[in-house]
Image (tube, rainbow, N blue to C red):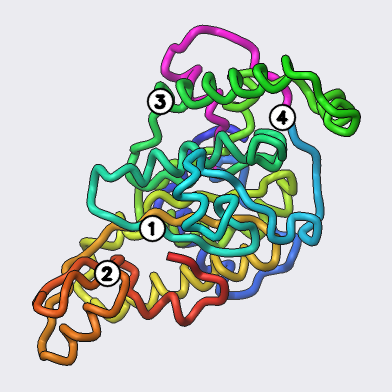
Amino acid sequence: MQVTGLAPDDAAEVLRLAAQQAAPGWRLAANTTGAASAADLLAQEAAPAGAAASNSSSSSSSSSKGRRRISTSCAALDALLGGGGVACGTVTEFFGVPGVGKTQVGMQLVVNVQLPLSLGGLSSQAMYIDTEGSFMTDRLIDMATAAVQRVQQQQQQPPAAAEQQQQQQQPPCSVESLLSGILHFRVQHHMQQLALVRSLDLLLQQHPQVSLVVLDSATFHFRQAFPDAGQRARLMTAMAQQLAALAEQHGVAVVMMNQVVTRIADSASSIAAAAKSSSGLSSSSAAWLAPALGEGIAGSTPEYNT
């Protein structure tokens, strides 16, 4: 699909159709798909010319994806995530202050998911929903280049019979093929974001080779222009629940990057509760950092990891 953008009015129409439970076969108009591969983005930035290789993964059923995991390329982080990295069928949330590397983790994951199982991947493809404009193709090329080198180093080692057969069945791994295996959505308005999340079920049906969806970040467009804090909270909670349902239904890994907000304790009991939580600082702290979506969402969605 080519990137053309999704205007707020078009996004509102998508939401209206979804709310009316339109027929299961409805399709987005061709000029509102909003997706492009990373290779297309690279071409738009006048990068060195090169034909993109065909996508490197084949279709697989939701049941086969199960609880497979995608490595983050950081052993310590993989261990914190339960061993092996981000799990399919669940929503995993990374939150923190600006500059701690949330986007880097998301970009590394969309590269790693395309690697073979022996290197922590799933030989699949990925979707990247970019709400902040922080998806950097130059950095992605560096990651893809390093990934190709890892694959080449593994291929130089004498493989076992089963591994050799698996390698022969896989198409050649290149920077171009890794970039082409990423569907990139640039979202510039909260209506676009809500419409896209509503459309993910259809998109995942159209692209069954996708095993990872990254939303970076979940709350960027909801931090302003919402005078009704209650409405904003309801919309974000509904969005998180929709993503959790999609992860479970399609067996994909959903990764959300999230901003943080400062919580102010209004009583001694609140301070004590914060000290016991993962985001609490100490028993004497009157303020602490918490994910912007709210800590209550983790308890309202199944398989939601922070």
Q: CA distance from mark 1 to mark 4?
A: 27 Å
Mark closest to the chain's N terminus, 4 or 2: 4
Residue at 24 percent of width and 77 percent of height: 229
Please state, as top left, top right, bottom left or bottom right, where the C terminus lies in the image. bottom left
Circle 1 residue: 218
Quadrant of residue 186 in the image?
A: top left
Residue 225 in which image quadrant:
bottom left
Disc 1 or 2, which lies upstream in sequence? 1
Viewer-nearest of discs 3 and 4: 3
**Which of the 4 image quadrants contains residue 260?**
bottom left
**Percent from the top left, x then y, of residue 100?**
28, 45
Quadrant in the picture for the N terminus: top right
Residue ID for mark 3: 139
The residue singled out by tag 4 in the image is 55
Residue 132 part of the magenta segment:
no
- Segment colored magenta: 34-54
Name the residue beneath numbered marker 2. Answer: 279
Q: Position of residue 209 (x, y in %)?
A: 73, 44
Q: Tell which of 1 and 271 is nearer to you.
A: 271
Q: Is residue 5 left or right of residue 262?
A: right
**Sequence order check, earlier mark of 3 and 1:** 3
User: Is 41 inside the magenta-drawn segment?
Assistant: yes
| Amino acid identity at mark 2 | Ser
Image marks 2 and 3: residues in contact by CB distance under 8 Å: no
